[in-house]
Image (cartoon, helix red, strand yellow):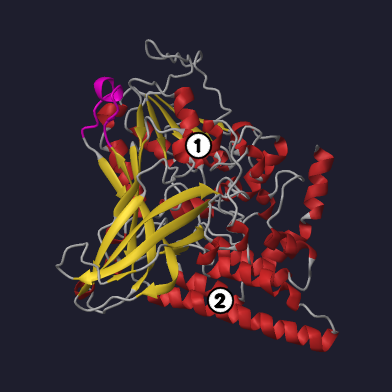
């Protein structure tokens, strides 16, 4: 094993030099814990091509700085600069990912200009649980799924876990990323209010913090009076968390457990932990489970899977509390023409660069590369036009009352709930009215945006509301535009062409939103938006239609 690790270090030495030369000062060694790790192509290119090393490293760095984004197709430098410009200063990523092409497990309509590799739905034929879990496909359809179809931390082999660590968990081992989350004051205030504002509920309780990071939630739980706190952290950030516990005088209460939460074992006998009467498992000894698991548009990153596994294994089923306790996803139409047009312009620029490249390669080297234009165009279209964008929208950019498209009760939600939403399983439809006269600038509909809220409140399920403690002081965290900056921001889904708003008329947008995991990475999602637009005179009945458009469908990758 040691020899293999040394070989891996030597193999990736140039990667380290390249990234350091480009200004990336985080420890590159943390990217690779095993020589079997599968590198993202943009990173791998930096190791093996002196000509492309600076460009590839630049792509790595700039997408690393953009919140949770690491795009698969590396566009021209103007695109990378623009992404930096759009992201709010200080909104650097908490997650580092290799993203995949738009391969959504959706039946798509080829007339709606869908990506060529999105056309076929995954084959059915699995059990109902697995089919729902994998968006209708088999476990083998997903590159990093375990043999049972789960994320690698459930029951993946060593290679799958190592790759998952390199693509996802390793960024959590950096204090830089922890600082970005701790500097999100809306996030911090909500969790602080939920814990310290309900100290009487925490008094003498057993608490588990799933994904503790630097450990601040565990510190608050201890200071709120918890008898025992088990703070679980997969990465070496666990070492920093131990230091934080010592520095804050709670190391006698907080136990740091390093490892995947699916694997950890609580010292139940040593600490005299007991399950509630009638509990089906003797491991269900935790009174309160806290976690900050939410990703872009709530579900991205699939950390909810691990939280559900921890809940079912450790939380007391009748009296236990989840914090947060409930989550809701929203969508709304938006006006965002500057960024929509910028994406379209950059796409056009990329295709212009390609035409020049083909011509110069033919003229200088006698090789015709034009045969690749179709595939290049697809890559650029998916990257520029069919990828969601991190945004910090202003309230006035939201054109209608947001529609809730998915609700989760954290005490009862299932792995199927965590894996996405489809028209068959969820009330994921929307029906928006946009009154042109209420838009002072007359701006068009540029697309849709998605965000989420979470609540910290008493249990509402039939079992819990009878037996679990009541939270006297509920707390709320929102990532909506009107509630100010959070590092999650909002995800925007720009339309290829905007929908104009006509004075004296109301535009109606009816449709649905669906999410499924990508075949390349179970921690990433694709989003399908279907909608039809119509117009009527403002104030008239909804069926008094002046114009009715056809249903349109687009699939986006959530970066």
State which quarter of the image contains the N terminus.
top right
Instruction: Compare residues 289 and 391 and report the one nearer the observer.
Output: 391
Q: Which residue is mark 1?
A: 305
Point 50% across, 13% down: residue? 269
Q: Residues within 10 Å of mark 1 (few under 14, many from 20)?
A: many
Distance between the alpha carbons at the discs numbered 1 and 2: 36 Å
The quarter of the displayed image where residue 216 is located: top left
Point 56% across, 72% down: residue? 80
The quarter of the displayed image where residue 71 is located: bottom right
- The range drawn in magenta is 457-472
Point 82% across, 88% down: residue? 364
Q: Which residue is mark 2?
A: 347
The x and y percentages for residue 3 are 84, 41
Q: Is residue 502 left or right of residue 171?
A: left
Prevailing secondary structure class for the magenta stretch in the rendered image: loop
Point 15% across, 67% down: residue? 540
Which numbered disc, 1 or 2, marks the residue that appears first in the sequence?
1
The x and y percentages for residue 221 are 37, 33
Q: Is residue 425 visible?
A: yes
- Relative to 97, say whether 158 is above or below: above
């Amino acid at each position: 094993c040691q020899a293999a690790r040394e070989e891996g270090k030597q193999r990736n030495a140039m990667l380290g030099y390249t990234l350091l030369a480009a200004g990336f000062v985080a420890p590159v060694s943390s990217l690779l814990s095993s020589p079997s790790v599968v590198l993202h192509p943009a990173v791998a290119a930096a190791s093996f091509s002196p000509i492309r090393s600076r460009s590839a490293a630049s792509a790595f760095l700039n997408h690393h700085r953009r919140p949770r984004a690491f795009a698969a197709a590396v566009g021209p430098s103007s695109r990378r600069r623009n992404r930096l410009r759009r992201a709010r200063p200080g909104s650097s990523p908490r997650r580092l990912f290799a993203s995949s092409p738009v391969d959504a497990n959706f039946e798509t309509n080829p007339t709606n200009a869908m990506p060529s590799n999105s056309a076929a739905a995954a084959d059915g034929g699995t059990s109902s649980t697995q089919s729902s879990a994998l968006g209708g496909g088999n476990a083998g359809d997903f590159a990093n799924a375990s043999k049972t179809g789960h994320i690698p931390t459930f029951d993946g082999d060593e290679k799958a876990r190592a790759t998952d660590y390199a693509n996802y968990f390793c960024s959590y081992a950096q204090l830089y990323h922890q600082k970005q989350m701790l500097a999100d004051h809306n996030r911090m205030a909500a969790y602080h209010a939920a814990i310290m504002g309900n100290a009487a509920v925490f008094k003498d309780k057993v608490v588990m913090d799933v994904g503790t990071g630097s450990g601040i939630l565990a510190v608050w739980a201890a200071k709120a009076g918890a008898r025992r706190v088990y703070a679980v952290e997969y990465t070496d950030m666990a070492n920093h968390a131990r230091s934080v516990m010592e520095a804050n005088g709670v190391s006698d209460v907080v136990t740091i457990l390093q490892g995947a939460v699916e694997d950890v074992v609580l010292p139940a006998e040593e600490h005299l932990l007991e399950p509630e009467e009638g509990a089906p498992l003797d491991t269900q000894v935790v009174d309160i489970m806290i976690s900050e698991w939410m990703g872009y548009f709530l579900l991205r990153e699939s950390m909810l899977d691990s939280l559900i596994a921890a809940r079912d294994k450790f939380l007391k089923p009748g009296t236990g509390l989840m914090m947060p306790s409930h989550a809701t996803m929203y969508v709304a139409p938006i006006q965002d023409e500057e960024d929509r047009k910028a994406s379209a312009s950059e796409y056009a620029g990329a295709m212009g660069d390609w035409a020049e490249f083909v011509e110069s390669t033919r003229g200088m080297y006698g090789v015709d590369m034009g045969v690749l234009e179709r595939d290049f165009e697809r890559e650029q279209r998916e990257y520029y036009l069919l990828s969601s964008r991190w945004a910090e929208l202003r309230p006035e950019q939201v054109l209608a009352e947001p529609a809730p498209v998915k609700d989760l009760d954290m005490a009862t939600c299932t792995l199927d709930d965590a894996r996405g939403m489809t028209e068959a399983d969820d009330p994921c439809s929307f029906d928006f009215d946009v009154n042109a006269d209420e838009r002072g600038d007359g701006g068009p509909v540029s697309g849709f945006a998605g965000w989420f809220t979470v609540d910290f409140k008493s249990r509402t399920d039939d079992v819990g509301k009878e037996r679990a403690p009541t939270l006297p002081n509920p707390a709320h965290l929102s990532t909506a535009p009107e509630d100010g900056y959070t590092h999650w921001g909002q995800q925007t889904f720009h339309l290829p062409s905007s929908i104009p708003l006509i004075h004296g008329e109301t535009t109606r947008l009816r449709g649905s939103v669906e999410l499924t995991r990508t075949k390349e990475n179970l921690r990433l999602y694709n989003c399908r938006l279907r909608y039809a637009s119509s117009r009527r005179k403002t104030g008239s009945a909804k069926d008094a239609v002046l114009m009715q458009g056809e249903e349109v469908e687009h699939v986006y990758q959530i970066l």
